[in-house]
Amino acid sequence: AQSVAQPEDQVNVAEGNPLTVKCTYSVSGNPYLFWYVQYPNRGLQFLLKYITGDNLVKGSYGFEAEFNKSQTSFHLKKPSALVSDSALYFCAVRGGYNNNDMRFGAGTRLTVKP
Amino acid sequence: GAVVSQHPSRVICKSGTSVKIECRSLDFQATTMFWYRQFPKQSLMLMATSNEGSKATYEQGVEKDKFLINHASLTLSTLTVTSAHPEDSSFYICSAALTGGTDTQYFGPGTRLTVL
């Protein structure tokens, strides 16, 4: 069964600084990796995904993530953080083409301070 | 991007009553819909997967008679919490996907259920 880990409960960065939210995964077969963001009392918004192709994936709102197969990681990054980026971020993995299940990490709360 | 709606967004009910939550894909046909439950400050837990026209597949530990799921059409899935109790209070989120493969899951805004 697939699983994903987000080792940091909380990440704090200053506005304008680069940010990284970490994610590692475990899956048999080729991973399908996703990042979602959740604002208070709201559902999840899709940011980006890796299915195949370039290891660096660019997504919404200036976010990007790098797939690293050898380290089984899919860290989310942004070159310059905004206060409005403050939210809860979830990494998710789906294993295999016919696997409908998506497993989520525990979430990382990002706080960007002015 | 694809839009998924949920109704109601918030519901308060008395213990013992049943509550129905609707999940609709507004601009695409969803072969598969998923129901998740999220406790405060925790991640999403998959409850069940429903495919249009067939019975839902429930995750281990989720009571299928307690959480009734119907996926009657390619744009609508419903979750009915039967005989709700205070411990059923939670944030319920649905998602929809075209197929199970590479297609992205698009999430609804969630429904906050409070059982008194």
Image (cartoon, coloured by chain):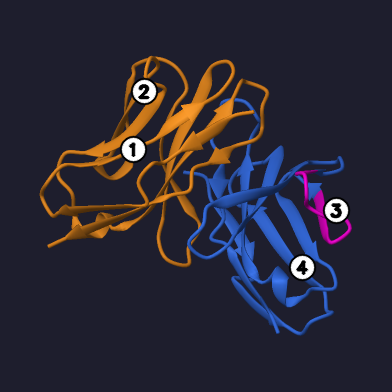
Chain colours: A orange, B blue
* Quarter-of-image position of residue A3: top right
The type of residue carrying mark 1 is Lys
**x 54%, y 45%: residue:** B106
Which label sits in the foreground, 4 or 1?
A: 1
What residue sits right under mark 2 in the picture?
A67
Which chain does tag 1 point to?
A
Q: Position of residue A30 (x, y in %)?
A: 53, 17
Within the magenta stretch, is there residue A50? no
What residue sits right under mark 3 in the picture?
B64
Disc 3 residue crowd, few under 14, some 14–19, many 20+, Cα 10 Å:
some
Pointers 1 and 3 within a single chain? no
Pointers 2 and 1 within a single chain? yes
Say which of A59 and A6 sits in front.
A6
The type of residue carrying mark 3 is Lys
Q: CA distance from mark 2 to mark 3?
A: 37 Å
Q: Earlier in the sequence, mark 2 or mark 1?
A: 1
What residue sits right under mark 4 in the picture?
B20
Q: CA distance from mark 4 to mark 1?
A: 37 Å
Q: Quadrant of the N terminus of chain A?
A: top right
Assess whether mark 3 and mark 2 are in contact (beta carbons under 8 angstroms): no
Q: Quadrant of the C terminus of chain A?
A: bottom left
**x 58%, y 15%: residue:** A29
